[in-house]
Image (spheres, rainbow, N blue to C red):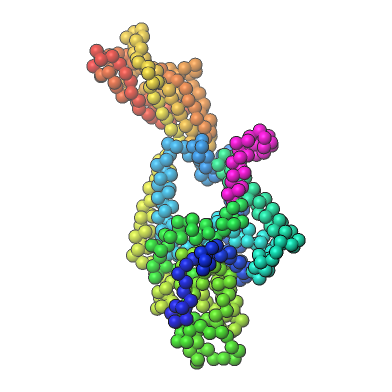
Amino acid sequence: MAEQGKDNFRDTIGTLNEEGDRAWIFPKKPVGKWYEYRKYVSYVLLAFLFAAPFIKIGGHQFLLFNVLERRFNIFGFPFWPQDFYIFVIMMLTGVVFIILFTVAFGRLFCGWVCPQTIFMEMVFRRIEYWIDGDRGKQKRLAKMPWNKEKIRKRSLKWFVFFVISFLIANVFLAYLIGSDRLIRYITDGPMEHLSTLVSLVIFTGVFYFVFAWFREQVCIIVCPYGRLQGALLDNKSIVVAYDHKRGEKEEGRAKFKKNEDREASGKGDCIDCHQCVDVCPTGIDIRNGTQLECVNCTACIDACNIMMEAVDLPKGLIRYASEENIEKKTKFEFTPRLKGYTVVLGILVSVLVGMLFLRNDVEADIFRLPGQLYEYKADNLISNVYTYKLINKTNADIEDVRFELMSHKGNVEIVSRDTFTIPAGGMAEGTLFVELNAGSLSGDKDKVVIAVFSGDEQIETTRTAFLGPRTYK
């Protein structure tokens, strides 16, 4: 890189000034092809985000993450704490996918899919442009004393920000407690459910704080993903990059002069217009290379392409490219490192799919009632009392449920009923007695196998302990 670029390289984050105070960023409104593409992707994702908790499949919420009651719905299929091992595999698969994606394409996720970026740049920032104006007007408004114009604009912006934060908090709550319950709480009135109202106010405050004040600091300071890229990226990773070979050349950057022959003079194609910096939402200069704060939002690509077109120079001075592509003009290749991550990801996906297909529709747990010993009955029978809990993981009721002994001859009697129904995505629990002939016991603690039937179909099998007297060993 030319000496000029080295002199301009900074050793602090772009949101701090020389005194170490917060340097407020006023990015210029992006315009261009990539920004339009991002808008389309963002609006689709926003529509999905707001609609998902209100979509029902087979009567079940499409996405539900009820941590307090330990109930989860993923794509309409209910999951329970007993399926925790599946969640572990899901998380591992997600981590490996993120690693693979980052090694290949850098922080593409951050610029195009991350909810923080989408809400900040495509919702709150656009409202700010609408109320406060573009970069220059925002800077003048910030320096302006508190007069009528500033009070009016600030009040309107903060009010709109609060309303949107409140809507986001409601949707967030719908994912946690369920959309049906949220709607019922709203129709009942806020005073009927004060704890939920308090939670809603807290969520609203958090979202308002993040998008009205903390902003890009989430990506720079809080988000761990930005730190990961330092360990995951290499010179073959495709990122938003500045072509320093073309932009700097022998004489480095220089302002554009009409009718000049830049190539003959040895000047780089970078005309030092500063547009790529002005438009950056995290306040960096992409010409200094890949940096922690860069979220690959493509705003600098659009800004640079517009300027290159205006001065009749080739576009693509800033583009999606790898360092190796810039240095050696090589194309993207599937490296051994990527192949290794792909193999690991393929194995995890295969295991996950297998677990999902082998996942039982019913989870059965039968435990002896704590503190209870066996009981003698007529005809040399010994009885143990148990509690049972059956979880239905399907979207349909399971009817005519009963128990049968598979390992011993004996009887299973359900307290107060012969059969019962497990509701769709729900749970059934109760008490039962197991009666065995004393002569069939091999010791004072036998393992018995109990099958769960729905009509004539066996749907699950479980094991439990049966206590008997020591004299029957």
- Give, as a single range, the part of the protein colored magenta: 181-207
Regarding residue 377, the answer to whether it shows in the image is yes
Using the rendered view, name the quadrant where residue 307 is placed: bottom right
Front-lying residue, 411 or 242: 242
The foreground one among 254 and 349 is 254
Across and down, in percent, residue 67 comes to 50, 39
Rendered residue at 59%/44% (across/down): 202
Which SS does the magenta portion mostly show?
Answer: helix
Q: Is residue 57 above or below residue 444?
A: below
- Residue at the image point whose x is 70% and y is 64% from the top: 145
Which percent across, then down, holds residue 285? 51, 72
Does the magenta portion include 191?
A: yes
Quarter of the image with the N terminus is bottom left
Question: As drawn, is 217 to the left or to the right of 93?
Answer: right
Residue 324 location, quadrant: bottom left
| Residue at left offset 50%, top offset 23% | 420
Q: Is residue 206 magenta?
A: yes
Q: Is residue 66 above or below residue 369?
A: below
